[in-house]
Image (spheres, helix red, strand yellow):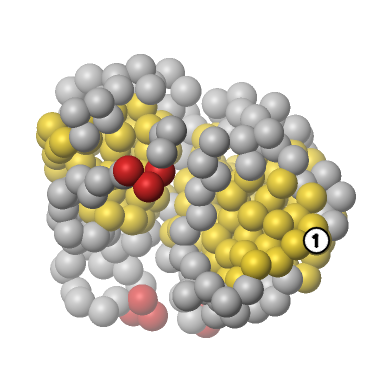
Amino acid sequence: MANPAAAAPIPVGHQILGLCRDEARGLIYAGDYFVNGVHAIDAALQSLVSTMDLSSSGFSGRTDPPPCCTIEPGAGRRTVALALAPEGDVLYAANYGTYDVARIDLATGEELDAFDGVVGPRQILVSADGGQLILAGVGGEGEQQVSALYVLDRATGKRVLEVPVGLSVAGVALAADGRRAWAIARDDGELVAFDAADWTETGRLSLGVGIDTLVLSPDGETLFVGNSIGGQVHAVDAETLALRTTVEGLAAPKGLAVVV
């Protein structure tokens, strides 16, 4: 956008928590936490054009989160994050309510069989080679705590790897070339770097408890990490994990984007 100040709101749904751009179709998909579906927005018209409904039950017939995370029973799937298949044919929706991954056939708008997911999902990405789904989740209490990234086979949905990060994995980022990855542990306050080829850890930086948003700059050189407890955004060198600068005094930053 040439002038971000000129942006106007687009009336869509009730509580939008996940966004995904479909360049080929000229659409933006928006997960609605309370509507049990995903909205499609025409990017040029800046208006809602359709809503793809999700089933009320998810993977293995689930209808609710674990007891640790249930506030209102039977409240639906509660989508919080989206990712588009490289082929552009399937939309993946990570759901809080049924802690699974819904799959939507974009040719028909119909839901396919869901994959098992992660408790308290925050982010879902497709690996650079298209073969895997990467899930970040903060988990719940006790045995529902999550301290690892979940790596799923994109064809079968099988969990093929759990990558240790730290308590409550709140975000993940992947380099465009597929060689590097990063994740944040909210409750341990650490940013962790990985070699994405085999998911071995290559570095770790302590930034403080409460970091819960992670985004990589388009040039792949800088990681921006938001801390909603401390009211900060850290800029970190993606290669060395050296802290470049910190912006203080923000009001609980929960989402970050780099506008170019």
In this rendering, position of residue 62 left or right of residue 233 = left
Instruction: Give x and y (percent) for residue 42.
Output: 22, 29
Q: Amino acid at mark 1?
A: Leu
Name the residue nearer the viewer: 218 or 122: 218
Q: Identify the residue position indicated by label 1 in the image.
A: 243
- Image point 29% across, 63% down: which residue? 97
Instruction: Give x and y (percent) for residue 130.
Output: 55, 26
Instruction: Give x and y (percent) for residue 238.
Output: 77, 47
- Image point 17% across, 48% down: which residue? 12
Residue 191 in view in this figure:
no
Quadrant of the image containing the N terminus? top left
Instruction: Give x and y (percent) for residue 35.
Output: 15, 55
Which quarter of the figure has residue 160? Answer: top right
Residue 193 against residue 143 in the figure, above or below = above
In this rendering, position of residue 177 left or right of residue 44 = right
Total tally of numbered discs in the picture: 1
Which quarter of the figure has residue 79? Answer: bottom left
Quadrant of the image containing the C terminus? top right
- Image point 26% across, 79% down: which residue? 71
Residue 222 against residue 207 in the figure, above or below = above
Name the residue nearer the viewer: 213 or 92: 213
Q: Residues within 10 Å of mark 1 (few under 14, many from 20)?
A: some
Residue 159 against residue 98 in the figure, above or below = above
Residue 170 in view in this figure:
yes
Determine whether the residue tagged by mark 1 lies in a helix, strand or loop: strand
In this rendering, position of residue 246 left or right of residue 141 = right
- Image point 21% across, 34% down: which residue? 46
Name the residue nearer the viewer: 152 or 194: 194
